[in-house]
Amino acid sequence: MSQPSKPNRREMLELAISRGLLVAGSASILSQQQLLADWQAAEAQSNKPTSAEVLGPFYRKGAPDQPNLRVPGDPGFPLKVVGRVLNTKGQLVEGARVELWHADHGGLYDTKGYKYRASLAPDAKGIYSVDTVMPGHYADRPAQHIHYLISAPGHKTLITQAYFATDPFFEGNPDKNWNKRGIAANKELVLPVKLFEGGSKPSDPARAEITFDIVLEKA
Ligand SMILES: [Fe+2]
């Protein structure tokens, strides 16, 4: 997916108007310029690099490229994780590798094998995806989380984590509690969770889903 070429000033104004940021004819030139500057700043902010977090003690090299981490009978609520790897211009990053790992439903990591661990190459549309279960809580890190290590040619390797806005740890108010006990480096890492009822087939269970788009900096 390639990003359209940078819009000129007129196109940006039209876009700003279409987004309700400006009302044509009603604002002075000066205030239009200020509004345009604010809008440009907001656009740039949306492509800032994803915040880094610590690697943690449970990373293991060599995880397989496996999108199905959950097998029938696994305890825990089914979870689908999807996302893309982008650069700061919002373009897909070529050749990215997304490693992710998390604790099982009981809060334990597989330290000998590769359960709930994957090293993924995004597909032709730039999307990575795994089917897994909601991570459990454990004493040292009392919020559910998924660890990430993302690498790509020409970009800085990023280590980060994803959290869940539905986690009881955030007490129903992640906007206020995202940094409770210093848990998350940035509010953006606490992700909204979509819930799906699922269908009658085992392949279509009730599940949660998060989308985590990652923005890498150039090396
Ligand atoms: Fe962890």
Image (cartoon, helix red, strand yellow):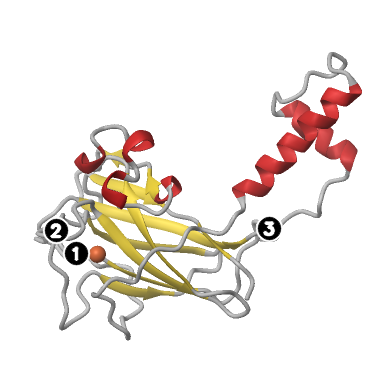
Question: Along the line of sight, which residue is nearer the eye, 180 or 129?
Answer: 180
Verify CB contact (< 8 Å) between mark 1 and mark 2.
Answer: yes
Determine the CA span between mark 1 and mark 3. 33 Å
Determine the CA span between mark 1 and mark 2. 8 Å
Q: In the structure shown, which secondary structural element does the residue marked by tag 2 occupy?
A: loop
Circle nearer the N terminus (1, 2): 1
Q: Image quadrant of residue 100?
A: bottom left
Looking at the picture, which amino acid does disc 1 mark? Ala
Rendering coords of residue 212 (x, y %) = 44, 54
Circle nearer the N terminus (2, 3): 3
Q: Is mark 1 within 8 Å of ligand 1?
A: yes
Q: Which residue is drawn at the image coordinates 60% and 47% (left, top)? A: 46
Determine the CA span between mark 2 and mark 3. 37 Å
Q: Image quadrant of residue 117?
A: bottom left
Question: Along the line of sight, which residue is nearer the eye, 8 or 82?
Answer: 8
User: What residue would you read off at disc 2?
Assistant: 138
User: What residue would you read off at disc 3?
Assistant: 89
Q: Which residue is drawn at the image coordinates 51% and 58% (left, top)? A: 50
Badge nearest the viewer, 2 or 3? 2
The image shows residue 164, relative to residue 119, as above or below, that is above
Structural crowding at the residue carrying mark 3, measured as other residues with C-alpha within 10 Å and reported as few (<14), some (14–19) or many (≥20): some
Badge nearest the viewer, 1 or 2? 2
User: What residue would you read off at disc 1?
Assistant: 103
Looking at the picture, which amino acid does disc 3 mark? Lys
Q: Is mark 2 within 8 Å of ligand 1?
A: yes
